[in-house]
Amino acid sequence: MTDFGLLSRFRRMSVPEQATTLIAVPIAIFICGLVWAHWLSNVVPRTPKSVPAEAVFLWAPAVGFPGGLPRRGNWLACSENLEKIRCSLWTIDGVNEYEGEFVGYPEPTPVPPDQLKIDTAKTDNSVQVWTGATEVPAVYLENGRILIPRDLFADFKKQLDKAKADRQ
C-alpha cells in the first residue's frame, strides 16, 4: 500500500503528538480562514466594466457572516454633462440603480467640474433618501460642498437641515 509522506509521518508520532496535531491543525485552518475573510471584506472590489474608472466605492453595512461577507456597497460617480452635474449610482456588480442631476446644498448653485472629487468617508456616512427601491446618498465633495439630487431636493434639504440643527 502506498503511503503519503505526511500520513506516514503522522503514524510515527506518539499518541500525545497525534492528539496535539489533530487539535492544532483545524484551529490553525480556522484562524487563517478568519484572517482571509477579514482581509477580503476590507478590499475594495474591482470596478465593473459598466462603471467608469473614476467611480468611488461606498461600503454598505455588513450583514451575514461576521467578517463582512458577502461584501456589499455601491459605486458612485459624478460628472459634468451640458453644464449640469450628473451622478450615477451602481450596485457592487455594476447594475445602474440611479442616475440624475445633482445640485449644490444648501442652495442649488453650480459646482465647477474640476471640483467634482468625492469624499468617500463623508459620503459613505451621509444622509440618504429612498427613491423607489434605491437609497441615494448626499454626495460630499473634498472641497466641503454637498451635492443632492435635484428631483429629491426638498427631501434631502429637510434631512440635512435637521442634521445640521441637531449638531448645533
Image (tube, rainbow, N blue to C red):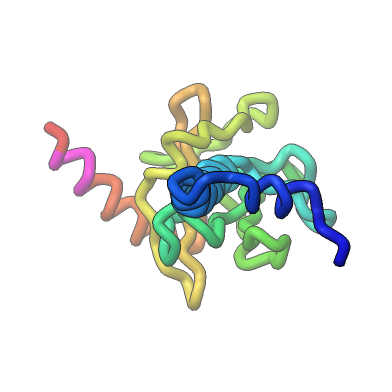
Position of residue 87 in the picture relative to residue 157 (left or right): right
- The magenta span reads 162-166
Vertical arrangement, residue 121 with respect to residue 32, above or below:
above
Residue ID at (61%, 64%) = 98
Quarter of the picture holding the C terminus? top left
Please identify the dominant SS of the magenta region.
helix
Above/below status of 102 relative to 121: below
Q: Nearer the viewer, residue 28 or 99?
A: 28
Name which residue lies at 52% across and 36% down.
120
Task: Name the quadrant containing residue 32.
Answer: top right
Q: Position of residue 34 (x, y in %)?
A: 49, 48
User: Which quarter of the figure is the N terminus placed in?
Assistant: bottom right
Q: Is residue 23 toward the left or the right of residue 32 in the image?
A: left
Residue 103 in view in this figure:
no
Q: Residue at horizontal 44%, vertical 26%? A: 144
> Residue 18 placed where, x, y %?
52, 50
Between residues 62 and 77, which one lies in front from this camera angle? 62
Residue 167 in sight here: yes
